[in-house]
Image (tube, rainbow, N blue to C red):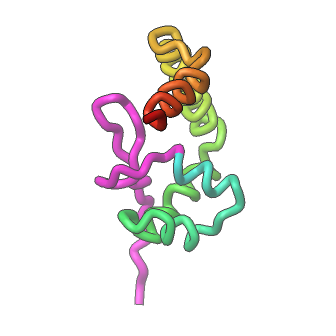
Amino acid sequence: MTIDVAAETPPLSADASGVLRIGSSRVTLDSVISTFLDGATAEEIAERYPSILLSQVYAVIAYYLSHTTEVDDYLRGREQHAAEVRRANERLFDPTGIRARLMARQSGQDSP
């Protein structure tokens, strides 16, 4: 009996925005790796994200462990992009005083 040993590519695909997703799901590489780094097992990750298979989780973790530098660079880039988007949104929608405005609106609705 022989076993065909072949290298498999990780089940990652980039969407139109360049975000890496697991297989054809909406689950991102960021989500799986951050959950893994928080201490979750592959089984727990697959349970948390039922749209991906356990074998896909193991493949992604194995890819991360073999390509830590590249994946960490990708994740840092995603964090920087998220920070830029957050700053842009804060410029467009100033959060200063939002609690006071919401409380004033709520107290105005509670008045007879």
Q: Quadrant of residue 25?
A: bottom left
**Which residue, as the protein is rendered here, is positioned at the far bottom?**
1
Q: Does residue 28 show up magenta in the picture?
A: yes
Q: Position of residue 66 (x, y in %)?
A: 62, 50
**What secondary structure do most residues of the magenta stretch adopt?**
loop
Give x and y (percent) for residue 89. 47, 17
Q: Residue at x 36, y 64 (%)?
A: 51
Residue drawn 43% across and 33% down? 109
- Residue at (54, 25) in percent of width and height: 104
Q: Is residue 53 magenta?
A: no
What residue is at 39 percent from the left and 64 percent from the top? Answer: 52
105 up-or-down from 3: above or below: above
Q: Depth check: give the residue in front, 54 or 66.
A: 54
The range drawn in magenta is 1-30
Q: Quadrant of the C terminus?
A: top left
In the image, residue 108 sits, relative to residue 71, either above or below, namely above
> Which of the image's four quarters has the N terminus?
bottom left
Residue 68, image x, y percentages: 65, 43
Residue 29 position within the rendered picture, expressed as x and y whole percent measured from the top left: 49, 46
Left or right of 51, for residue 63: right
Outermost residue toward the top?
A: 91
